[in-house]
Image (cartoon, coloured by chain):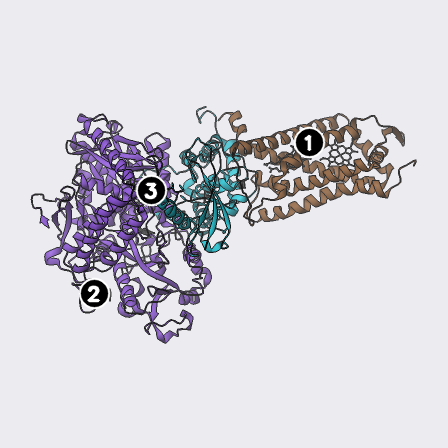
Amino acid sequence: MRFKLKIWRQSGPNVSGGFKEYEVDGVIPEMSFLEMLDHLNEQLVKRNEEPVAFDSDCREGICGTCGLVINGMAHGSRHECTTCELRMRQYRDGATITVEPWRARAFPIIKDLVVDRSAFDRIIQKGGFISTNAGSAPDANAILISKDVQEEAMDAAACIGCGACVAACPNASASLFVSAKIAHLGLLPQGQPERDSRALGMIQQMDAEGFGNCSNHGECEAVCPKGISILNITRMRRDYMGAARRVNPRKSGE
Amino acid sequence: MSVSRYLASTVVRKFIAGLTGVLLILYLILHLAGNLTLFAGPDIFNWYAGKLESFGALLWVVEIALALVFVFHAIIGVQVFLGKRRARPNGYAVSASRGEPSRQTLSSRSMIITGIVLAVFIPVHVWMFKFRPTPSIMVGSHEVRDLYALVITAFKQPLIAWSYVLVMGLLGFHLRHGFWSAFQSMGALNPRLLPLFYSLGVVVAILLAGGFLVLPLWLLYGVQAPGM
Amino acid sequence: MKIDTSITLDANAPSGPIDQKWDKYRSQGKLVNPANKRKYTIIVVGTGLAGGAAAASLAELGYNVLSFCIQDTPRRAHSVAAQGGINAAKNYQNDGDSVWRLFVDTVKGGDFRSREANVYRLSQLSVNIIDQCVSQGVPFAREYGGTLSNRSFGGAQVSRTFYARGQTGQQLLLGCYSALMRQTGAGRVKIFPRREMLDVVVVDGKARGITCRNLVTGEVESYAGDAVVLATGGYSTVFFLSTNAVNSNATAVWRCYKKGALFANPCFTQIHPTCVPLQGETQSKLTLMSESLRNDGRVWVPKEKGDKRPAHQIPEGERDYFLERMYPAFGNLVPRDIASRASKRMCDSGHGVGPTGYAVYLDFADAVKRLGKDVVRDRYGNLFQMYHEIMADDPYERPMQIYPAPHYTMGGLWVDYGLQSTIPGLHVLGEANFSDHGSNRLGASALMQGLADGYFVIPYAIGNYLATSEVLKTKVTTDHPAFKESVASVAAGTKKLLSIKGKKTVRDFHWRLGRVMWDDVGMSRSQDSLTRAIEQIRALRAEFWEDVNVVGGGDFNKELEFAGRVADYLELGELLATDALTRNESCGGHFREEYQYPDGEAMRDDDNFAHVAAWKFNGDGQEPSLVREPLVFEHVKPTKRSYK
Ligand SMILES: Cc1cc2nc3c(=O)[nH]c(=O)nc-3n(C[C@H](O)[C@H](O)[C@H](O)COP(=O)(O)OP(=O)(O)OC[C@H]3O[C@@H](n4cnc5c(N)ncnc54)[C@H](O)[C@@H]3O)c2cc1C
Ligand code: HEM
Ligand code: HEM
Ligand code: SF4
Ligand code: F3S
Ligand code: FES
């Protein structure tokens, strides 16, 4: 197979970038999208041109490192599929494919298709955990959790932190990511003691990072490789409103 | 946590957008019910308008509240829009929706446009039907404004009638996304309700926009103006 | 080969009965005064289960922690990819499990090449791990009554594996990550993502810091501390194609080896039986299909050689369920080394399926019939989906095609009972060390080991080290000449790679090295193949330094990152082959063709090889020397491993 690629090239964080066109030949249908880019890079290196920078690691859809906007869609056009899992058989031989990085103010571009998603870490630092020190836990079966609740929590916990939801959201909102963590921990009995502070802390940080507000477009759910539902967003709002009502201004130290 | 920080959060803003949106919808439902009395002819319509006015001060309170709701709603809508521009200063060269289960539609994307049209429309509309000097007529022993005549004269002008039709269409668009979105924003949905409200959005949009829309058309093409 | 007897490797395990060693270690180890803890800085490299758990737990104790990883965030360490589950001797199923049984299974599974004391401790701690993870909110699978659910894994006859769908590693890692983020938010951990450790700094014989490259700016940075904890994962990507992530590497451990840490059992590598077969030269990795699939999937090949009929046209009577046939007691659940080799034998003898003939079937037809599609989907849904994406084929309808692939490395830096390497102050955790799995790791035991090391062992071990080593009295900063020297040598290394400007790509070298390793140092090895491999690797290494082309600058440059890793692999590959050549026996994942029983099973030689082979670096171009740590089996008597 043969493709024409229009790829965003940008040499560093604070410089302007632009599209560059490349032809790749000798692509086989079994190749993943990233292997196709590897293949292109091999050819570029042989021509002494700088290869296209992009991030990836596990190459099996679980680490959340990869992520490209392909023909206007985050992670490409396949349902519940990351960029690294996407195969070239999805594309018509000879097609032109446009490849762009995640675009959001909170995800500044580092180089070419590589972006900085550390905003997600800072959000988790503000409450995306259950405070339990190693060694202090009771027996695992001392807490009974119904299968349904556990399954629901697992659905939300499946988030790989890739940021496709932000990339695809017309508002560049991080609501799906944040709500998935709030739902995962908020559904479980272990997560109850910190449920309020978690919702308040994480959402405040999300706002501070410069993500957009959520207009309920639901595009995030459609591109999410783990199919995280926007029901988590409505739940997160419920949690936040409840928490904000309950919160004691004196105790929160303000 | 300080109240201002709490209010400034995106979640609270959207909650308010949703709540004000629902209140506006409720108002529209009442307003439509009232307007439909136009079909029953001048007496009933004017009686209804008169009845409303007889609430006096209470009506004023309600109207001011409504105005506030409207302003709040509009401010937040504009803020969300500006925030979105800020959150993605450099847009995509190509962008496309992945389709199902995305709820991104023409309607959801054009909220700001349909909203602004409504923002322009409503003051004009209110001026037209409420604050403009209106001839009065007697209903029984009361003197009331002859709203019926006012409305019908207005809609006999095709330009006005068709502008209304257009705005009502856009209102329908605003509601197609707005209706279910409001509940999602207020944290009211669950796995059963979400699909239900999403579908109901179409029904609400068609009923409300359609309801308002037939009036100008009916008045323009169907009814003889009094005294003409 | 030089044998160095001047060094004695002492495991430093406490004396006494095996079930009391760990308690003794904990109660007799030296402690650091709580008020003093924040005066110590611990450098933790790696944020996988081992490193993440270590960094978080040490910070919880009050130490000041610096945490490094290659990825853009700690949450993406390769532990995230583990699918199947984690073992623990909870005996929730009442099926006869115990700490003792897990211990015996692990020692036997490792084919009697691990240290009993370590394995016993691992079994003991397995129980606490599950408690810890549940309290963090890890959503392990549960029964309708709300209790935890278990599945079976290879090499065990009890059900002791805890799992979270097919994403166990991800969920466990997110647990670690959340604990780490909590400490980062509290200011006790400082995280340094996108940093690659390229050197350990040793001052007065003690590990006092690291030098790394900032992968964004390209700057060479160094950090000083009072102890270094290394948890940088395994080196399976020496084979190029493996189930590991594309950034997995041996660079950190290799540079420590070159600074004096001994490298133990490099030839103990694990080839996992159930992976998606190779599809072409441009492939970048192989995808694992979790071992848990062998719970319900049946492995078979056509009885007829070269039978090219599609699977469904081959009648039941013409199928050879070879694992069930050869190992009736364990059937499809034999340990990995056994299953892999059996599959290879079937394919080598012409029974393989698929376009290349190098694949066997893993069939779920029976399971779907017995349990229904929904139950099967519930258990393996995401794996089936993954398979479907890659192969464009539906495992609910047609059997999967699978073939073995490099997966895990039991070898690693030598450590004592307290996880300390031969460089004082350098502790090594998780897959990066050699400790607990002998010559073959049982499924669901790596996650267990990583977390045991990180949450429960290192907090005590570090305290003991700090309290006895008096590092506080000799605080060093990065102004120390050793740091300056380290930075200069790392910078020079980078510059050298960039200046070669040859003709061949980095990937080309890695691919070719991988082919040599897979063909000659892979699932089965012989004196011939190993000697040949060593020659080829040397030639390839020479060619690399002459003819590699690293395009781009010294800043953000993935080619440069890979080049450094491949350069190290070109050295490690040779050590791996040398170790394999020296170990004249077959055991676990190490199979020497010369040493096998007539039925093809591995022939161990306990008289001559019941030891850890630890290698000492003697300088570039010099032969490394071998140091042996004898292994003593007091509780599980070595027998021929039989799963029949
Ligand atoms: C596909 C797959 C499935 C598996 N399934 C299972 C399973 O079901 N059950 C089980 O028990 N085990 C399983 N394993 C094995 C297990 O996942 C790993 O052995 C274990 O997670 C290793 O953890 P770790 O913390 O030692 O290292 P890793 O998780 O590999 O972490 C390594 C860390 O070190 C960092 N690092 C590496 N080099 C450097 C450097 N030079 N400088 C700075 N940082 C560096 C990385 O960034 C990363 O943070 C599986 C492995 C794979 C590959
Ligand atoms: C009668 C008039 C109006 C009605 C009934 C109405 C109704 C609604 C409803 C129900 C929503 C959904 C709220 C949510 O998602 O939480 C909404 C959203 C919105 N409205 Fe209105 N609205 C009206 C007027 C306006 C006006 C005047 C503007 C002003 C510019 C406006 C701008 C918006 C915008 C931009 C949104 C989207 C908010 C977002 O993206 O989150 N609307 N509207
Ligand atoms: C065909 C459609 C419509 C007709 C015939 C109509 C008619 C009227 C009339 C007659 C009044 C004056 C009532 C009075 O003075 O007591 C009025 C007021 C008003 N209308 Fe409409 N209207 C229509 C559509 C709309 C729509 C779509 C909106 C909003 C989006 C709207 C919002 C308002 C508001 C806010 C007032 C002022 C209410 C008050 O002050 O009490 N109208 N309308
Ligand atoms: S919610 Fe989905 S799209 Fe967003 S970060 Fe998580 S996995 Fe990626
Ligand atoms: S697409 Fe964006 S607007 Fe909300 S529902 Fe998803 S975050
Ligand atoms: S590279 Fe890990 S999800 Fe794509």
- What residue did someone put label 1 on? B119
Q: Colour of chain A?
A: cyan
Tell which chain the image draws in brown.
B
Residue C420 placement: quadrant: top left
> Crowdedness of circle 1 by 10 Å Cα count: few (<14), some, many (20+)?
some
Which residue is label 2 attached to?
Answer: C601
* Residue holding disc 3: C559
The amino acid type found where label 1 is placed reads: Ala
Chain assigned purple: C
Q: Are marks 2 and 1 in contact (CB under 8 Å)?
A: no
Q: CA distance from mark 2 to mark 3?
A: 42 Å
Which mark lies nearer to you, 2 or 3?
3
Q: Secondary structure at mark 3?
A: helix
Q: Nearer the viewer, residue C463 or A113?
A: A113
| Residues tagged 1 and 3 counted as in contact (Cβ below 8 A) | no
Seen from the viewer's position, the closer of residues C91 and A239 is A239
Q: Is mark 1 within 8 Å of ligand 2?
A: yes
Q: Label 2: state its secondary structure.
A: loop
The answer to whether residue C577 is left or right of residue C343 is: left
